[in-house]
Image (cartoon, grey):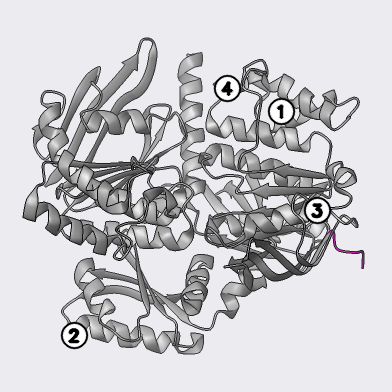
Amino acid sequence: MPDPLVRVEGLVRRYGEVPAVDGVSFEVERGETFGLIGPDGAGKTTTLRTVLGLLQAHGGSVRTCGLDPFRDRRRLSRRVGYLSQRFSLYGDLSIDENVSFFASVHGVRGFRPRRDELLEDLRLAPFRKRLAARLSGGMKQKLALACTLIHTPELLVLDEPTTGVDPVSRRDFWRILARLQQEGLTLLLTTPYLDEAERCGRVALMDRGKILELDAPETLRRREAGSVLEVLARPRRTAQEVLSGTPEVTDLETFGERLHATLSRTPREEAGAAAERLTATLRAAGVEVEVVRPVLPSLEDIFIARIRGRA
Amino acid sequence: MSAIEVSALTKRFRSFVAVDDLSFQVAEGSVFGLLGSNGAGKSTAIRILCGLLSATSGSVRVLGVDVLAEPERVKRMLGYMTQRFSLYEDLSVRQNLRFFGGVYGLRGQALAEREAWALEMAGLQGRQDTLTGALSGGWKQRLALACSVLHRPRVLFLDEPTGGVDPLSRRRFWALIDAMAGEGVTVLVTTHYLDEAEHCDRIALMHAGRLVALGSVPELKQVFLGRAVLEVTCPDYVAALRECEAQSFVHEASVFGSRLHLVVDDVPGVRAQVLAVLERTKNVPAAVERIVPSLEDVFIHSVEVADAAAGRQGAA
């Protein structure tokens, strides 16, 4: 078994007296896509920055690509790419010139074939003479990705890479990441979008400096103890009122015509029986019930249940 | 009754067509999502609907009022909240509420009542004197929402309201929106986050100024015509991805954890075809299951169909 590419053990990082990261441990295997997800202030960005050696750990240990990231920052920078939330492109340089600039910063020789390939894959090739300042948000973000990949890093660290990026650019983004992963690239990322977290092999749910859960998204969803029922009933508003008044229902969310009722105290095996109970309750209140059925909880459901559980 | 009626709306900036023959209706008390990429025309459309921008042609009625003829009248009937919450960061929560209340002509007892309501709605009781700049994204967002509805508008426009806000805050935000709709407020929201669009009763997808799909989320997922999404679970997904991408019946292949999602031609036997491909790569045992397309799948597909049609027109 080769060593993990990133190994974080009992990491603590404070700002003044306040611990932003408070005893976090995880490992990222080579070739894996690993996601840190959590609300603002959970400590995700701080964790990434210590993994990259941009911040020093106050406790615990961090190894990245076999190096001490803080002491060997310069050596590490040749082996990692970092797309931060405020990645700076040069607005008065063209797409081509931006990529060339980052290639020279990293001392990459003969970068042109790789540049051409990256721009082609990201569908930026037709615009390569355009100034970065004149690109749309999605295109800027794709260009930033090309710049972080020009030196062929082993590990790519992405901090909320698709915030503010439109769906088509987002798809381009993930397409190239999937291709690079076939070549062995490892991804460590943060995202506030839980549909995006589903693309990760494993995710760590973070809140207030701690990891609450760590596993494959699918495993987390299958393991979740409580039940979630999808409800389609008319009139929806009446159904909503009835369900919010039902003690068994711990959370209720609307998706257009459909409702998702979370029953966090009802074990998964009893979800079917609970669906029948809710159907009866709704009918008794004069609601026309089309469907009440158990569904797998989304990552968002699990996440929210965990955070509320801590509050 | 439709609270918003848009018909054949077109907006040109010189030779650039930002909004091209856009038509849709929004039922009173419903939540309607206007979705699209950057530059699709969403923001131009919403500005016209608010009476902030003139149209080149077409018509817009909001609560029966002709917006293009009487933009000032419409502005008073609307609430409008943008992505860059237009709050004053160096004012306290209470000062922001009073400022926006004043803009909407609220005074005395009426203002005090709405201020109290807004603090409760946004969950900001006890934080009246906090500087707005010191609030987290989620709090700011709820305060901005509260400010935009102080005057009890019957129509609320939300332009990219939740960019960069965490999941818990987004859920609270949508619960507030849903409650307002329940009281009869008509809500039109623009977003390019497709998971968020799942909250809308109906959705319009815009691309290059044009409407490319319109309907409820389940309807849109049904019109994923001629294509299906298969989820593949197999031992070596990297090899499987490479092999599947090379097949002519696979239009798109993407990685979700250690599984693949394939967009394929929706023809009988397509699952067997995929299984055969996997067997060739010795990638068994494998599971291939048909799954419901995501809204993102629907969006990408609609855009491709629209682009292909535009390409054909261009060639003709």
Q: Which residue is mark 2?
A: A284
Q: Which residues are magenta?
A: A1-5
Report how far apart the C-alphas of labels 3 and 1 lie in the structure: 23 Å
Which tag is nearer the camera, tag 2 or tag 1? Answer: 1
Q: Which residue is mark 4?
A: A133
Does label 2 lie on the same chain as label 4?
A: yes
User: Which chain is home to disc 1?
Assistant: A
Q: Position of residue A225 (x, y in %)?
A: 53, 83
Which tag is nearer the camera, tag 3 or tag 1? Answer: 1
- Given the image, on which type of amino acid does mark 2 rest? Ala
User: Which chain is home to disc 4?
Assistant: A
Report how far apart the C-alphas of labels 3 and 4 lie in the structure: 39 Å
Q: Earlier in the sequence, mark 4 or mark 2?
A: 4
Q: Give the SS element for disc 2.
A: helix
Report how far apart the C-alphas of labels 2 and 1 lie in the structure: 61 Å
Q: Earlier in the sequence, mark 1 or mark 4?
A: 1
Q: Which image quadrant for residue B45?
A: top left
Question: Mark on residue B239?
Answer: 3
**Residue visible at 42% across and 30% down?**
B40
Q: Which image quadrant for residue B234?
A: bottom right
Residue nearest the viewer, comparing A164 with A298: A164
